Image (cartoon, rainbow, N blue to C red):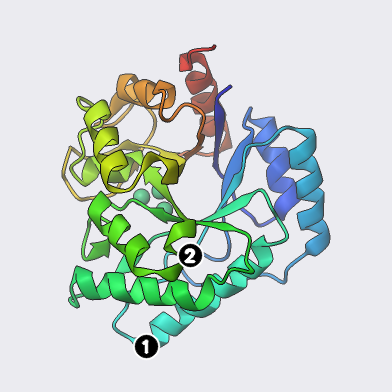
């Protein structure tokens, strides 16, 4: 069975997202933990979280994915920005402890002229401070396209963060198909080779989630602009091979394509049809 969902708005709460997911044929979803471009957050509603837990159990959901805000940059040169990253991740992880079936995905950060090595050191330091053993949530590093000074633009940088952090053994990876394609990994013509490379450098056991997106740009463009499934540089055939690949087919897939709810419903139906049963 294909586990698939899409990004949903959290504005009506946790249970509302679960219901919305079911209404479009999804068995999981992704949401922002707080305002993605600011960082403000609503008061936590433990009852709503418990209601989602029950709902997910009743409807056999795959793990849901919480996405940290874009403003979280643990690799920043500015100490105040790094402090915001620490506070935000700590608070989000404390909330997510109430939703055992959630994982937290974040963009490793941007080093802004400090160099990738220093960026990696700062990200690992933040994780050491906030991702303490008492927090049950699995934290995922997202593969980035490499625009600007993004850290995590290749598998080696993700590995380096894991190696530099005491919490490294608990970290997983969320592979974004648009990002790796824009970052230069040819998942259209060489999917097996790319996954072999991932396995050698990071380890396939660390791969816990896939952001399933097409790309508005070409291989290696380092752009990061998502396109609807089948309408971009990756294409439906290649994305069909992704969801059916033996190393990936049991993972949860999350659409982050430029769609409203009805468009997501169509893409989910399309991909369910393209998923080989058995
Ligand atoms: Fe992301
Ligand atoms: Fe993504
Ligand atoms: Zn993106």
As drawn, 140 above or below 243: below
As drawn, 48 above or below 207: below
Q: Which residue is drawn at 39% across and 77% down?
A: 125
Residue 270 place in picture, x, y as percent:
49, 19
Dot 1 falls on a residue whose secondary structure is helix
Q: Which residue is drawn at 31% across and 40% down?
A: 199
Q: Mark 2 points at which residue?
A: 69
Residue 260 place in picture, x, y as percent:
53, 39
The image quarter in which residue 159 lies = bottom left
Q: Mark 1 points at which residue?
A: 79
Residue 266 place in picture, x, y as percent:
53, 25
Dot label at residue 4: none
> Disc 1, ligand 1: is the CB inside 8 Å?
no
As drawn, 109 above or below 66: below
Which image quadrant: the N terminus?
A: top right
Q: Which of marks 2 and 1 is in front?
A: 1
Q: Which of 94 and 37 is in front in this view?
A: 94
Q: Which of 182 and 186 is in front in this view?
A: 186
In the rendered picture of this protein, how many numbered marks are placed on residues?
2
123 vs 183, left or right, is right
Dot 2 falls on a residue whose secondary structure is loop
Residue 175 visible in this rendered orientation of the protein: yes
Q: Residue at x 35, y 21 (%)?
A: 241
Q: Nearer the viewer, residue 232 or 33?
A: 33
């Amino acid at each position: 069975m294909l586990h698939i969902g899409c990004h949903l708005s959290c504005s009506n709460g946790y249970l509302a997202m679960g219901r919305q997911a079911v209404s479009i044929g999804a068995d999981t979803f992704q949401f922002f933990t707080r305002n993605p471009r600011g960082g403000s957050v609503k008061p936590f509603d433990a009852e709503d979280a418990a209601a989602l837990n029950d709902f997910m159990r009743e409807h056999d959901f795959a793990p849901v994915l919480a996405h940290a805000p874009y403003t979280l940059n643990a690799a920043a040169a500015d100490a105040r920005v790094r402090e915001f990253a620490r506070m935000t991740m700590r608070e989000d992880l404390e909330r997510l402890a109430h939703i055992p079936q959630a994982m937290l995905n974040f963009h490793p950060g941007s080093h802004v002229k400090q160099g990738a090595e220093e960026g990696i050191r700062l990200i690992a330091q933040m994780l050491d401070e906030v991702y303490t053993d008492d927090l049950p949530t699995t934290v995922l590093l997202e593969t980035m396209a490499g625009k600007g000074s993004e850290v995590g633009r290749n598998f080696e940088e993700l590995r380096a963060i894991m190696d530099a952090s005491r919490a490294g053994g608990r970290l997983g990876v969320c592979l974004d198909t648009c990002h790796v394609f824009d970052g230069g990994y040819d998942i259209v013509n060489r999917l097996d080779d790319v996954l072999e490379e991932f396995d050698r450098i990071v380890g396939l056991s660390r791969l816990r989630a896939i952001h399933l997106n097409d790309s508005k740009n070409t291989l290696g463009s380092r752009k990061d602009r998502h396109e609807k499934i089948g309408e971009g540089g990756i294409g439906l055939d290649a994305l069909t091979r992704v969801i059916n690949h033996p190393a990936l087919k049991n993972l949860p897939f999350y659409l982050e394509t430029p769609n409203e709810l009805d468009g997501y419903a169509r893409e989910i139906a399309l991909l369910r049809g393209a998923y080989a049963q058995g």
